[in-house]
Amino acid sequence: MTLDEAWRILQLNQFKRTKNREMILAFFAQNDRYLTAGEVRNYMEVDNPGISFDTIYRNLATFTELGILEETELTGERHFRMHCEAGVHHHHFICTRCGKTKSIPDCPMDLITIHLPGYKVAGHKFEVYDKCPNCLVG
Ligand SMILES: [Zn+2]
Ligand SMILES: [Zn+2]
Ligand SMILES: [Zn+2]
């Protein structure tokens, strides 16, 4: 998702363009990987000392609800990243050390629905975790 798309979604949902929201979204746009709220706060604090976790979490929750960010839990902590471009359905490998993702074009649901005859399935989540090649070397 681009910053322009993110702002369009926020505007459509009557959210104002605040400095905090601008900074948080810019940070995600610059980092193509999963980030923790702590990392967002460290970045925000440079220009905005004393910004509360509450403010950051509230904005992260808003962005996630609107589909601007996607959220996952890695090593017991919530992580966020900019939502992928709308397009072809895919899944992610997520590196638990650096937070980078690799997209996987195949979907396991074709195999799984065999086991669900007569069930209605609205959606699914599928993520693969461990270390990326870079982190295995490091
Ligand atoms: Zn993706
Ligand atoms: Zn990695
Ligand atoms: Zn799928």
Image (cartoon, helix red, strand yellow):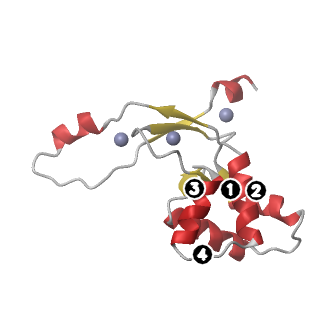
Badge number at residue 122: none
Badge number at residue 39: 2
- At horizontal 60% and vertical 75% (from top left) the residue drawn is 15
Mark 3 Cα shell of 10 Å, populated few (<14), some (14-19), many (≥20): few
Q: Are marks 2 and 3 in contact (CB under 8 Å)?
A: no
Looking at the picture, which amino acid does disc 1 mark? Thr
List x then y, in percent, for residue 8.
Answer: 57, 63
- Asked whether 11 or 77 is in front, the reply is 11
Among the two numbered marks 2 and 4 on one chain, the one whose residue lies closer to the N terminus:
4
Mark 4 Cα shell of 10 Å, populated few (<14), some (14-19), many (≥20): few
Q: Are marks 1 and 2 in contact (CB under 8 Å)?
A: yes
- Structural distance between the alpha carbons of marks 2 and 4: 24 Å
Label 4 vs label 1, nearer the camera: 4
Name the residue carrying label 4: 15
Name the residue carrying label 3: 5
Looking at the picture, which amino acid does disc 3 mark? Glu
- At horizontal 32% and vertical 35% (from top left) the residue drawn is 108
- At horizontal 63% and vertical 74% (from top left) the residue drawn is 58
